[in-house]
Image (cartoon, grey):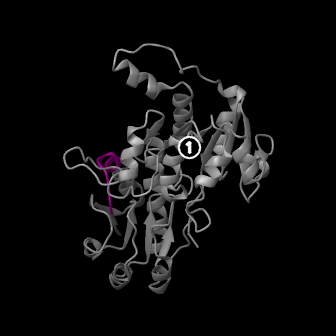
Amino acid sequence: MKLLMYSVRADELENLKAIEQKYDVEIATTDKPLNLDTVDLAKGFDGITVQQHGKIDDSLIYKKLHDFGIKQISLRITGYDIINFVEAQKYDLKITNVPAYSPRSVSELVLADVMALLRHLRETHLREDKSDFAWNELQAREIHNLTVGIIGAGKIGSAVARIFKALGAKVIVSDPVKRPELFDTVEYVDYDTLLTQADVVTMHTPMTDFMHHFMNIDKFKQMKNDAIFINASRGPVVNTKDLIKALNDKEIAAAAVDTFEGEAGITGVDLSNEGFENKHLSKLLQMPNVIVTPHIGFYTDAAVKNMDLISSIDAIKIIKGEEPLHLVK
């Protein structure tokens, strides 16, 4: 049995060796994403796994995979909005994802971002670069006195809730699905209540039509003027232009984004020589009250190991004619 893994990084190679030995499978790798230019690399393989931000939307990609005898695309990520499900169904390709590679990985980045913004660490470091060690406007708030609002309390959002609850914060949640296991940790409220009451608003939702640009200028205006906004879900759930306006107009106090619109071709890539074209990202990077990270919320040793293992197991199951554990329907 032969698997081809697209967009493989050097830090994944040891994981793949262990998978080969345990599951008696031959794994080949490429550092290229799956697209029209690279789909032919899959010829001769039994299955593929993919991890990328760029969309896989061209019908010819799905047709070629089908013609090569491949029956699936196993994503080494949680988000599946990169897939054209109409074409996948047309060519009998099953799609799997990794819904819970390590919820702690993202939640711990959110905690780090909130702590850094509350303590004004970026602003402090920028001042110190100019030998300014004054305290003015650097007074912080303490987490146990705050209300943390979570939009989307699935596995990752639930982990975020538990961390902030453990630190003494009041945690409120907006999610159409109410999880009984969270009833002792959070209070479920509607979106309007969350936005107006929370001192920290953090998003952990999938990318759906409903969530596209969910956070816009009207919703930012509902937030407290001293509130912090965090996005560690999908870039397009936030209208980036509106986020910048909200920050400039002091509708909110600060923000941290681990995902952003137009991140394909930027995150995970060293562009120090050629630069990049994304005017909204450029503006965010210049703001002293904004933290931007290149989609690294997932990027821990435990999470990467699980992403490689879970996606490979699902690919192997489909190849064998068995039902995968994480089929996206």
- The residue drawn where x is 51% and y is 48% is 245
Whether residue 121 appears in this view of the structure is yes
Q: Quadrant of residue 327?
A: bottom right
Whether residue 320 appears in this view of the structure is no
- The residue drawn where x is 33% and y is 45% is 11
> Considering depth in this image, is 247 or 9 the residue closer to the camera?
247
- Quadrant placement of the C terminus: bottom right
Q: Is residue 30 left or right of residue 18?
A: left
Q: Which residue is mark 1?
A: 230
Q: Is residue 10 magenta?
A: yes
Helix or strand or loop: what does disc 1 sit on? strand
- The residue drawn where x is 57% and y is 46% is 103
> Considering depth in this image, is 167 or 69 the residue closer to the camera?
167
Relative vertical location of residue 327 with respect to residue 217 in this rendering, above or below: below
Relative vertical location of residue 235 with respect to residue 103 in this rendering, above or below: below
Q: Is residue 77 left or right of residue 59?
A: right
The amino acid type of the residue labelled 1 equals Ile
Q: Position of residue 222 (x, y in %)?
A: 68, 47
- Which residue occupies the extreme left position in the image? 273
Q: Is residue 254 magenta?
A: no
Q: Position of residue 140 (x, y in %)?
A: 59, 22
Q: Quadrant of residue 40?
A: bottom left
Q: Position of residue 65 (x, y in %)?
A: 35, 79
Q: Which residues are magenta?
A: 6-14
